[in-house]
Image (spheres, rainbow, N blue to C red):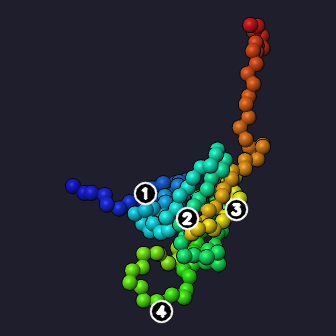
Amino acid sequence: MTRLTTLDLPHFHRATIGFDRLFEQMNTQFANSPNGNGYPPYNIAQINDDEYMISVAVAGFGMDNLNITKDGDTLKIEGTAPKGDEDVNYLHKGIGGRNFRREFTLAEHVNVENASLELGMLNVHLKRDVPEELQPKKIKINEGLTIEGESK
Protein backbone atom coordinates (compact mmCIF):
# COMPACT_ATOMS: atom_id res chain seq x y z
CA MET A 1 0.00 0.00 0.00
CA THR A 2 1.34 3.41 -0.93
CA ARG A 3 1.24 6.01 1.81
CA LEU A 4 1.22 9.73 1.07
CA THR A 5 3.96 11.30 3.17
CA THR A 6 4.38 14.53 1.23
CA LEU A 7 2.04 16.72 -0.75
CA ASP A 8 3.14 16.94 -4.38
CA LEU A 9 1.69 20.36 -5.22
CA PRO A 10 3.46 20.75 -8.59
CA HIS A 11 1.75 17.53 -9.77
CA PHE A 12 -1.68 18.91 -8.80
CA HIS A 13 -0.75 22.32 -10.21
CA ARG A 14 -0.21 20.88 -13.70
CA ALA A 15 -3.69 19.35 -13.70
CA THR A 16 -5.57 22.54 -12.91
CA ILE A 17 -6.33 25.71 -14.77
CA GLY A 18 -7.32 28.93 -13.05
CA PHE A 19 -6.32 27.85 -9.54
CA ASP A 20 -2.85 29.40 -9.60
CA ARG A 21 -3.47 31.70 -6.65
CA LEU A 22 -4.92 28.83 -4.56
CA PHE A 23 -1.77 26.75 -5.04
CA GLU A 24 0.49 29.73 -4.31
CA GLN A 25 -1.38 30.29 -1.05
CA MET A 26 -1.10 26.60 -0.17
CA ASN A 27 2.65 26.62 -0.85
CA THR A 28 3.05 29.71 1.34
CA GLN A 29 0.96 28.13 4.10
CA PHE A 30 3.03 24.93 4.07
CA ALA A 31 6.24 26.98 4.13
CA ASN A 32 4.98 28.87 7.21
CA SER A 33 3.44 25.83 8.91
CA PRO A 34 4.45 24.72 12.40
CA ASN A 35 5.85 21.52 10.88
CA GLY A 36 8.17 23.62 8.74
CA ASN A 37 10.07 26.59 10.07
CA GLY A 38 7.97 27.71 13.04
CA TYR A 39 10.31 30.54 14.00
CA PRO A 40 9.35 32.99 15.31
CA PRO A 41 6.04 32.01 16.88
CA TYR A 42 3.07 34.30 16.31
CA ASN A 43 -0.58 34.84 17.23
CA ILE A 44 -3.39 36.31 15.16
CA ALA A 45 -6.20 37.84 17.21
CA GLN A 46 -9.51 39.24 16.01
CA ILE A 47 -10.27 42.38 17.99
CA ASN A 48 -13.68 42.98 16.38
CA ASP A 49 -15.35 42.40 12.99
CA ASP A 50 -12.93 44.71 11.16
CA GLU A 51 -9.76 44.78 13.31
CA TYR A 52 -7.02 42.20 13.77
CA MET A 53 -3.68 42.01 15.57
CA ILE A 54 -0.69 39.92 14.55
CA SER A 55 1.73 39.44 17.46
CA VAL A 56 5.16 38.00 16.70
CA ALA A 57 7.59 36.94 19.45
CA VAL A 58 10.85 38.71 18.55
CA ALA A 59 12.83 38.64 21.80
CA GLY A 60 16.31 40.04 21.27
CA PHE A 61 15.42 41.98 18.11
CA GLY A 62 15.44 45.78 18.13
CA MET A 63 13.52 48.16 15.92
CA ASP A 64 16.53 48.49 13.62
CA ASN A 65 16.55 44.69 13.10
CA LEU A 66 12.90 44.43 11.99
CA ASN A 67 11.25 45.28 8.68
CA ILE A 68 7.52 45.23 7.86
CA THR A 69 6.39 45.50 4.24
CA LYS A 70 2.94 45.33 2.64
CA ASP A 71 3.11 44.38 -1.03
CA GLY A 72 -0.34 43.96 -2.58
CA ASP A 73 -2.18 41.43 -0.44
CA THR A 74 0.99 40.12 1.25
CA LEU A 75 2.32 41.34 4.59
CA LYS A 76 6.00 40.47 5.10
CA ILE A 77 7.68 40.64 8.49
CA GLU A 78 11.45 40.16 8.38
CA GLY A 79 14.07 40.15 11.07
CA THR A 80 17.85 40.32 10.83
CA ALA A 81 19.68 38.72 13.75
CA PRO A 82 21.47 41.27 15.92
CA LYS A 83 25.26 41.04 15.80
CA GLY A 84 27.71 41.41 18.62
CA ASP A 85 27.59 38.29 20.80
CA GLU A 86 29.78 36.04 18.64
CA ASP A 87 32.57 36.17 21.21
CA VAL A 88 30.28 35.14 24.11
CA ASN A 89 30.74 31.58 25.40
CA TYR A 90 27.17 30.40 26.08
CA LEU A 91 26.60 27.44 28.38
CA HIS A 92 23.00 27.31 27.11
CA LYS A 93 21.45 29.44 24.37
CA GLY A 94 17.66 29.05 24.26
CA ILE A 95 16.76 32.47 22.87
CA GLY A 96 16.65 32.29 19.10
CA GLY A 97 18.72 34.89 17.33
CA ARG A 98 18.48 34.02 13.66
CA ASN A 99 17.14 35.75 10.59
CA PHE A 100 13.50 35.12 9.81
CA ARG A 101 10.78 35.98 7.31
CA ARG A 102 7.05 35.54 7.87
CA GLU A 103 4.45 36.18 5.18
CA PHE A 104 0.73 36.65 5.74
CA THR A 105 -1.87 36.86 2.97
CA LEU A 106 -4.33 39.66 3.71
CA ALA A 107 -7.92 39.82 2.53
CA GLU A 108 -9.07 42.62 0.26
CA HIS A 109 -9.28 46.08 1.82
CA VAL A 110 -7.21 45.09 4.89
CA ASN A 111 -4.61 47.74 5.70
CA VAL A 112 -1.82 48.00 8.24
CA GLU A 113 -2.81 50.66 10.78
CA ASN A 114 0.39 50.64 12.86
CA ALA A 115 3.05 48.45 14.43
CA SER A 116 4.67 48.54 17.84
CA LEU A 117 7.48 46.70 19.60
CA GLU A 118 6.94 46.15 23.31
CA LEU A 119 8.52 43.65 25.72
CA GLY A 120 9.83 41.44 22.89
CA MET A 121 6.49 41.32 21.05
CA LEU A 122 5.99 42.92 17.65
CA ASN A 123 2.31 43.86 17.34
CA VAL A 124 0.92 44.72 13.90
CA HIS A 125 -2.56 46.25 13.97
CA LEU A 126 -4.68 45.57 10.86
CA LYS A 127 -8.00 47.11 9.91
CA ARG A 128 -10.45 46.28 7.14
CA ASP A 129 -11.80 49.39 5.39
CA VAL A 130 -14.32 48.37 2.75
CA PRO A 131 -15.33 51.34 0.56
CA GLU A 132 -18.98 52.37 0.87
CA GLU A 133 -19.77 51.40 -2.73
CA LEU A 134 -18.51 47.83 -2.11
CA GLN A 135 -20.31 47.21 1.17
CA PRO A 136 -23.36 44.94 1.14
CA LYS A 137 -26.63 46.80 0.66
CA LYS A 138 -30.00 45.74 1.99
CA ILE A 139 -32.59 45.46 -0.78
CA LYS A 140 -36.09 46.47 0.16
CA ILE A 141 -38.82 44.04 -0.78
CA ASN A 142 -42.00 45.78 -1.93
CA GLU A 143 -45.44 44.30 -1.41
CA GLY A 144 -48.07 44.03 -4.10
CA LEU A 145 -45.88 44.00 -7.19
CA THR A 146 -47.73 43.06 -10.32
CA ILE A 147 -46.59 41.56 -13.54
CA GLU A 148 -47.73 43.38 -16.68
CA GLY A 149 -51.19 42.31 -17.67
CA GLU A 150 -51.92 40.66 -14.30
CA SER A 151 -53.35 42.10 -11.16
CA LYS A 152 -53.03 40.88 -7.65
User: How many marks on residues?
Assistant: 4
Residue 1 placed where, x, y %? 21, 55
Q: Which residue is mark 4?
A: 87
> Type of residue at label 3?
Asn
Identify the mark nearer the N-term, 3 or 2.
Answer: 2
Q: Which residue is mark 2?
A: 56
**30 to 95, vertically: above or below:** above
Q: In the drawing, what numbered circle is on residue 12?
A: 1
| In front: label 4 or label 3 | 4
Does residue 102 show up? no
Residue 9 placed where, x, y %? 43, 60
| In front: label 4 or label 1 | 4
> Type of residue at label 2?
Val
Does residue 124 show up? yes
Q: CA distance from mark 1 to mark 2?
A: 33 Å
Number of residues whose C-alpha sits closer than 10 Å to that of mark 3, classed few (under 14), some (14–19) or many (20 or more): few
Q: CA distance from mark 1 to mark 3?
A: 38 Å
SS at badge 2: strand
Q: CA distance from mark 4 to mark 3?
A: 36 Å
Q: Which residue is mark 3?
A: 114
SS at badge 3: strand
